[in-house]
Amino acid sequence: MKLKISELDALVPLGVVNINTKGIGVEDNIQIDSVPVQLSISPITDDYRVIGNLSFPVLKSCDRCLTEYKDKVNANFEIMVISNDSPLSESDDADLIVLNPGQIEVDLGPSIRDAIAIENNLKNLCKNNCKGICLKCGVNLNNQDCLCLESQTDDRWEALKKNKLLTTEN
């Protein structure tokens, strides 16, 4: 998402910008082509503080049962856009974008993409108590029961059951 420096002044103090999701390189499971981003831009002498948030639907696949489900991504970000001769800001939570002399636009896309990636779950679950699929027959255990679990055992582990050190006696 590239903004011209003159657009930063026009959006002060608050503006909504639609960004193309393909242009910032986010995942393919986003169901819409354009995401509205709420921006709050504060000028600080020759620099700018850009605070934004966005929310959009995504289609995910459950890591346990492989069922597709709809989810929502909410991401917040803070970016400091500073001129090349500005002393580096000590902002602890903000990304820093340095403007070179003569630069007419700034690319917020990588910072927005990083904010979205941080908000994504490491484990995607359709519901918290998802039972997953049977490892033997592949049945979705959320939809129906499977007889594989009760009737089949793995005989390779029988020798460990006989080990006296592993058995707990009261």
Image (cartoon, rainbow, N blue to C red):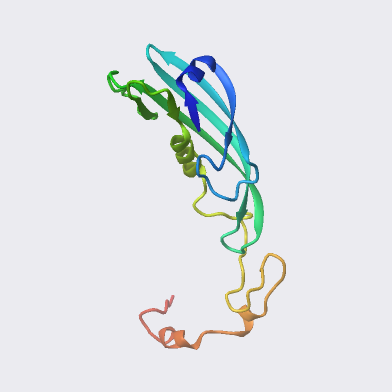
Please report the residue visible at 33 percent of the width from the left and 24 percent of the height from the top. Answer: 100
Report the quarter where the C terminus lies: bottom left
Would residue 157 appear left or right of 66 to someone viewing this image?
left
Quarter of the figure with residue 78: top left
Residue 37: percent from left, percent from top: 57, 30
| Residue 127 higher or lower than 159, as above or below | above
As rendered, which of 164 and 170 lies closer to the eye?
A: 164
Task: Give the residue at x 62% y 60%.
Answer: 130
Q: Is residue 96 above or below residue 66?
A: above
Residue 75 appears left or right of 161: right
Q: Is residue 58 left or right of residue 92?
A: right
**112 w.r.t. 40: above or below:** below
Image location of residue 15, percent across then percent down: 58, 21
Q: Among all residues in the image, which is located at the extreme right?
A: 144
The residue sitting at 72% across, 70% down in the picture is 144
Q: How many marks?
A: 0
